[in-house]
Image: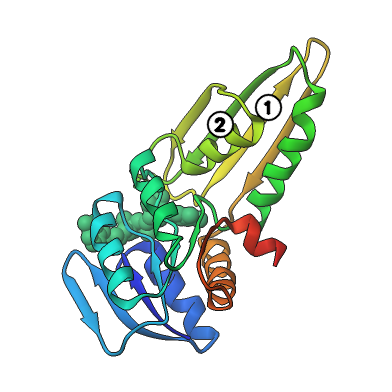
Amino acid sequence: MKYGIIGASGKMGKEILGVFDEAQHICVYTYDVDGEAQIEAPEVLIDFSLPAAFPKTIEIVKKFKVALIMGTTGLNAEQLELLKELGKEVPVIQSFNFSVGIQLLLQCIERVKGQVDGWDVEITETHHRFKKDKPSGTAIMMKQALGRDVPVSSLRLGGVAGEHNIYFGGLGETLTLSHTALSRRTFAEGVLKSALFAAKKQSGFYSFRDVMAG
Ligand SMILES: NC(=O)c1ccc[n+]([C@@H]2O[C@H](COP(=O)([O-])OP(=O)(O)OC[C@H]3O[C@@H](n4cnc5c(N)ncnc54)[C@H](O)[C@@H]3O)[C@@H](O)[C@H]2O)c1
């Protein structure tokens, strides 16, 4: 696959370059604050940058008419709506979390939520000190899976790649569902799965759950 990365110089950009390189895919386009570099037209574009890059991302996708894997968090409702619109033209895969374990955690939440009437529910998320958005996009997805708003506590500590917990508390017991990303590699592997998935699709707006379902 010939692919391009928006946010190529960032922590996730570098991780994605490494994982795609191992699988012998070729990076032919990069874009970051220092400008763009192009060798050939990419077959798929991957965005792990900041919401400020969003207009340029849309412009590049339309220019090359290729699939987009959108991993940037902190996008607002209008930007998410624009991505859905873009999905009418090309395959768009958007997720605030590309790890398999978080998708399983979301499914666990959907399973538990109907059985805990009257219990307290709270979420905690811990990330490295450089993370810009708060709460994390994953915490937002966890609330969506729960189907209601609950308190989220955000910790920003050192180099933590990503830790999410959801606590259910009854008067006589508590239940905790917990996920830890051990490194950024898990997200990059999810992006690779998504890029391979996108290559088989015509157009549409997809989640990482759709990718996992095949
Ligand atoms: N969806 C997921 O699974 C997942 C996983 C990890 C991180 N993320 C998200 O991915 C994004 C990147 O994370 P990171 O840890 O690599 O951050 P980072 O700060 O290390 O990298 C971001 C890169 O984007 C570039 N950038 C910023 N603004 C830009 C602009 N206007 N135009 C072009 N380039 C611009 C920066 O120069 C930098 O190289 C964040 O939004 C983060 O929350 C998502």
User: Do tag 2 and tag 1 residues touch (Cβ < 8 Å)?
Assistant: yes
In the image, residue 66 sits, relative to residue 100, either above or below, namely below
Horizontal relation, residue 200 to residue 92: left or right: right
Q: Residue furthest front?
A: 88
Q: Position of residue 179 (x, y in %)?
A: 65, 45
Which residue ends up furthest to the left in the rendered image? 34
Viewed as shown, does residue 104 lie left or right of 97? right
Circle 1 sits in a helix, a strand or a loop, which is it? strand
Of 44 and 179, nearer the camera is 44
Residue 124 is tagged as 2
Mark 2–mark 1 distance (CA, rounded to whole Å): 8 Å
Q: Examine the rendered structure and indicate whether residue 38 appears above or below residue 109.
A: below
Q: Residue at x 59, y 40 (%)?
A: 164
Q: Amino acid at mark 1?
A: Tyr
Within 8 Å of ligand 1, the CB of disc 2?
no
Amino acid identity at mark 2: Thr
Q: Quadrant of the C terminus?
A: bottom right
Tell me where residue 13 sits by quadrant.
bottom left
Task: Indicate the quadrant of ligand 1 in the picture.
Answer: bottom left
SS class of the residue under badge 2? strand
User: In the displayed structure, does residue 73 sit left or right of residue 126?
Assistant: left
Q: Is residue 63 left or right of residue 96?
A: left
Circle on res. 212:
none
Q: Which residue is mark 1?
A: 167
**Dot 1: few (<14), some (14–19), or many (≥20) neighbours within 10 Å?**
some
Point out the tag, 2 or 1, that comes first from the N-terminus: 2
The residue at the point 24 percent across, 57 percent down is 55
Percent position of residue 188, x then y: 51, 67
Q: Position of residue 15 (x, y in %)?
A: 44, 70
